[in-house]
Amino acid sequence: QVQLQESGPGLVKPSETLSLSCTVSGYSISSGYYWGWIRQPPGKGLEWIGRIYQNGSTHYNTSLTSRVTISVDTSKNEFSLNLNSVTAADTAVYYCARVGKSRPFFEYWGQGILVTVSS
Amino acid sequence: QSVLTQPPSVSGAPGQRVTISCTGGSSNIGAVYDVNWYQQLPGTAPRLLIYGNSNRPSGVPERFSGSKSGTSASLAISGLQAEDEADYYCQSSDSSLSGYVFGTGTKVIVL
């Protein structure tokens, strides 16, 4: 059974960098699929942030591309999200998920982690 | 700013049938891209409900069905149950944005 688990600080100061990790169990990241991040501001809808492939190839939401970096560590079977220069508008629940290459839907999701941007 | 538009809410009595629309454009639903649907119960992560326009993952009840036509898609829930009260999101890909896009979300209210 594929499982994903987000981890990282729940509070980040404005202008600093939000850093989260997603640990995958039950499946090897090296075996394929894209691995992505999605966020959901409190009371609002879902927004795709970006994705990464096992070889490190990335693709980001055009609205966030200047501030986002996603990386992968296949030895730890985890991938990470960095979002810099955060503001209150980046306060959200952040989810990691697995998405297919030829089947572009989010099949497995982490439980989500709330990150609040506040001083 | 979502490019896929859904009604904010739909409601129905137990046992009734409700439908949720998802309207896009020529760069997403109207192109070659499939539509997927997710159910989000309060306080939980979204769960894949329908993929590839009309396919149900294992474990999803048959009363959930999906369809796509032109630049729109629909999710139907027949035999509505109290446990179906949740938020529902459509999702597709978009060639103009070169990525994945989600709908605005619809809250299903069971009367």
Image (cartoon, grey):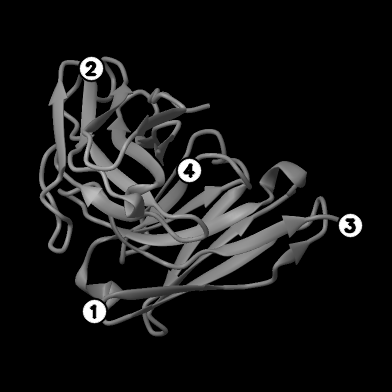
**Local crowd size for mark 4, using a 10 Å CA cut-off: few (<14), some (14–19), many (≥20):** many
CA–CA distance in space, label 2 to label 4: 20 Å
**Local crowd size for mark 1, using a 10 Å CA cut-off: few (<14), some (14–19), many (≥20):** few
Q: Amino acid at mark 4?
A: Leu
Q: Which residue is mark 2?
A: B71
Question: In the figure, A76 relative to B30: above or below?
Answer: below
Q: Which residue is mark 3?
A: A119
- Nearest to N terminus: mark 4 or mark 3: 4
**Local crowd size for mark 2, using a 10 Å CA cut-off: few (<14), some (14–19), many (≥20):** some
Q: Amino acid at mark 3?
A: Ser
Q: Chain of mark 3?
A: A
Label 2 and label 1 in one chain? no
CA–CA distance in space, label 2 to label 1: 35 Å
Q: Nearer the viewer, residue B46 or A101?
A: B46
Q: How far across and how far down the image is residue A25, in percent? A: 33, 82
Q: Which residue is mark 4?
A: A46
For label 4, the SS is: loop
Q: Nearer the viewer, residue B32 or B52?
A: B52
CA–CA distance in space, label 4 to label 3: 25 Å
Q: Chain of mark 2?
A: B
**Local crowd size for mark 3, using a 10 Å CA cut-off: few (<14), some (14–19), many (≥20):** few
- Name the residue rendered at 44%, 59% in the picture: B45
Horizontal side, residue A47 vs residue B17: left or right: right
Q: Nearer the viewer, mark 4 or mark 3?
A: 4
- Report the number of numbered marks: 4
Question: In the figure, B99 relative to A49: above or below?
Answer: above
Asked if disc 2 and disc 4 are in contact, CB closer than 8 Å, the reply is no
- Nearest to N terminus: mark 4 or mark 1: 1
- Give the position of the C terminus of chain B as an image quadrant: top left
Q: Which residue is mark 1?
A: A1
Asked if disc 4 and disc 3 are in contact, CB closer than 8 Å, the reply is no
